[in-house]
Image: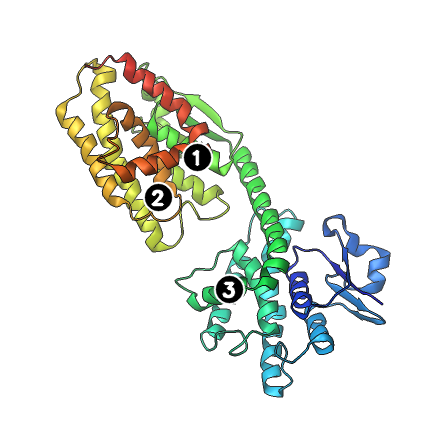
Amino acid sequence: MVMKLYKMDFSPPVRAVLMVIEVLEIPDVEMIDLNLFKGEQFSEEYLKINPQHTIPVLIDDDVTICESHAIVTYLVDKYGKDDTLYPKDLKKRALVNQRLYFNSGILFPCARGAGSPLIFKGAKGFSPESIESIKSGYVFAERFLSRTPWMAGDHMTLADICCVSTLSSMDAVMPIDEATHPNLCKWLKRCSEFDFYKKRNVPGLEIMRGYVTARLAEIAKEQAYIMGLKLYKKDTSAPCRAVYMVIELLKIQDIEYVTMNLKGRDHFTDEYLKLNPQHTIPTLIDGDFAIWDSHAITTYLLNQYAVDDSLYPKDPKKRAIIDQRLHFDNAILFGSLRETMVPVIYDGEKTLRPENVDKIKSGYDFIESFFTGPWLAGDSLTLADICCVATISSLNEVIPIDKKQYPKLTAWFEECSKQEFYKKANVPGLLLFREMVKSAELE
């Protein structure tokens, strides 16, 4: 009789069983998918098989097993060619068993406590308690792996297969900090290199990650709508375009945009001065909260609405580098743009002041020296790139970047220009700025 496995691939316990089946090369397993979203686990037929209405469930002839750890130990005992995965030595087996109970009693409740309310019960995010539980689970796992390279000794066992299905899921919810948990990160990387992991864990993991990401994005949109986001802006403004690009990347919708006429002094009205005493743009209103300065706005939006920290990492060292670039953009790059263009736009000057031209070129010199990788703050796109490219793209309209003198800046600017968020959220306002510069008829 062919074995049957009741499953849903996004489930960490199911993925553990799938990996063991792959490692043991067990053929002819009938895979029966259950749709938990439709409540198929509560059908009368399924409840007769498993009164706990959980997955996975394995049926092998007249044996029905309803728990992933019990399933995998059964499979290894019955189909394993040797005892590598689940040693017969009593002390070694006891250690593996301890890690399996650790997974079922500590790690999986952490993953379930964070993911289940979000995915199945409409929670508005991860509770502080669930995040603390995940952090605690990481601490325990790090301690285990500080003693041995694998969860239960010097080679891979069932302990690793079961724990990695859960820990990879937890990492999708709250990424493991390599600085705090180096051994755990190294172990996870080693596990991820096995073919059984790639074939049987990754597909379901990505499905789960998709559920979480989609739900968090949905929550962000709901919150934005409920809170009533309003942005006071002017499209030619580089700081405003930086905010647009972040909004585009976060896919925040239902924002009320209020265009300001600076020449008409809209920013000096009593109403606006109550919101922003500095009378600058952009200004963001989120419910009863008002914040101005594009850098403060973009960091707020990322902290409030981003589904991960890739654009503005929580790691203190990585964030410090980004913050340095943001202050550089504010004080040096935008400072030179503002000082150059205000006399042109508001005072009608037809010649750029030499000292301002020098400041722009000095900004180019500095930023050229910042690059140690393809992006301004490392190997991946961050908020530093978004804010700086908004300003650099405007400066380039005033003093074009010399490609020979600034090869790194040029390559970075070209790469930024290829990004969809740049094309959609920066280019329209940049073209208006270009026309403004042309209409000034500078000599």
Q: Is residue 439 visible?
A: yes
Picture coordinates of residue 273 (x, y %)? 33, 25
Q: Residue at x 84, y 70 (%)?
A: 61
Q: From mark 3 to mark 1, how far is it between C-alphas?
A: 31 Å
Q: Is residue 135 left or right of residue 108?
A: left
Depicted 353 relative to depicted 377: above or below: above
According to the image, label 3 marks what residue?
Answer: 188
According to the image, label 2 marks what residue?
Answer: 375
Q: Amino acid at mark 1?
A: Gln
Q: Is residue 129 left or right of residue 49?
A: left
Labelled pair 3, 1 in contact (Cβ < 8 Å): no
Q: From mark 1 to mark 2, how far is it between C-alphas?
A: 13 Å
According to the image, label 1 marks what residue?
Answer: 419
Picture coordinates of residue 225 (x, y %)? 55, 33
* Number of dots carrying numbers: 3
Query: SS class of the residue under badge 1?
Result: loop
